[in-house]
Image: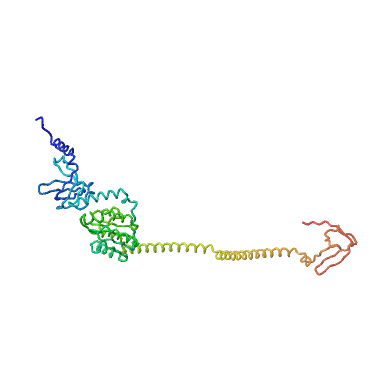
Amino acid sequence: MNNVYSVAQVNRYVKNMFTQDYFLQNIYVKGEVSNCKYHTSGHIYFSLKDESGTLSCIMFAGSRKGLAFRMKDGDKVVAGGRVDVYERDGRYQFYAREITLEGAGALYERFLALKQELEDMGMFAQEYKQPIPEFARRVGVVTSPTGAAIRDIANVSTRRNPFVQTILYPALVQGEGAAASIVKGIQMLDEAGVDVIIVGRGGGSIEDLWAFNEEEVARAIFECRTPVISAVGHETDFTISDFVADLRAPTPSAAAELAYFDCRSFLDAMQGYQERIERAIWNRIDVNRAKVERYQTRLQYLNPESRLRDQQQYAADMQERISSAMEQKIKDKRHRLSLYLERFYGLSPLRKLNQGYSYVSDEKGKTVTSVSQVKQGDSLLVYVTDGTIRAAVQDTRKEERDDG
């Protein structure tokens, strides 16, 4: 009973055995895929089998970049990774880091080597990527004139914008001489002055797509002055041209969607801009019209002619008031004058004369009011109502009178 161990201890011991075995940590296994399931977490669960047995396998989501195609049951593959023990279940399984279709392993190794070499040279660097023009007028296409790619591009271009000119370079996209044909097409369309170039083809095996993994094609795309969209194969297919191009499209149809702007959407947008501009202009006109009306009102209020008319009216009112006041004043003065004249009439010397009184003065015209002013023999002038009497003083007599 001294050699009794727990399940966990046994599983951990076996796991350490697998971990310490260098051979099992870096191994390639070939077989047929079965029970392949893509989990929502991104992990892929599958089995590899041959005529003698089955091996449980898993590829974690973090290793998915090592899978360049959509794996399915029945595929003959070569998987690289490690064998390890899953302690909880006490079973061993294969943890895949990379998977290639059987027969394409050597090509895939070449693909990875060239990809690393060009990446180290900086040909995939983002700073070298050119922006794809938003409104291209001429689109160049390098592909087979009889393949599905050109038909897909033509369908999309007709639907989105039939007014954009499409220039096709009929290139070989598979087999001997394909790489040179693709390079020549890129160079000729670059010289032709198109706005953007689509380089691509439909899907296929790694051998079928290999022309787009050639270094000369990668360099032609990198050196092209015109922006290049790479559209090779299906969404899960990746080639060297995808990495070096200015933009990668998952399919030729998607590349056409990116290269040909939608004229209907463009016209709708322009119509919307026109309506917005017109509304803005009319709003501005309304605002300015209201301002002009306010200024006109203020101008009319401040207009010198209007103010002059107001002043003229004020002057006329004041003149009328002054005339009325003057007439009333004259009327009052005339009445008072009449009263004064009546009073003065009662005090008039002529009236007194008419009543029998006379006015006496000496020869010099000085009024004589006292006997002390004359002496015997002096000449006097006596004024009566109808003339003057000259008289001589014969005698004077002073008399006391009571004025009361």
| x and y, in percent, of residue 236 in the image | 23, 54
Q: Nearer the viewer, residue 19 or 72?
A: 19
Q: Going by the picture, which residue comes out furthest to the top?
A: 2
Q: Which image quadrant: the N terminus?
A: top left
Question: Dividing the picture into quarters, in which one does residue 349 lie?
Answer: bottom right
Question: Dividing the picture into quarters, in which one does residue 198 lie?
Answer: bottom left
| x and y, in percent, of residue 356 in the image | 79, 66
Position of residue 51 relative to residue 354, above or below, is: above
Q: Residue at x 85, y 62 (%)?
A: 364
Side (left or right) of 138 relative to 10: right
| x and y, in percent, of residue 244 in the image | 30, 53
Q: Going by the picture, which residue comes out furthest to the bottom?
A: 386
Q: Residue at x 25, y 49 (%)?
A: 113
Q: Residue at x 14, y 37 (%)?
A: 14
Question: Dividing the picture into quarters, in which one does residue 21 lie?
Answer: top left
| x and y, in percent, of residue 159 in the image | 27, 64
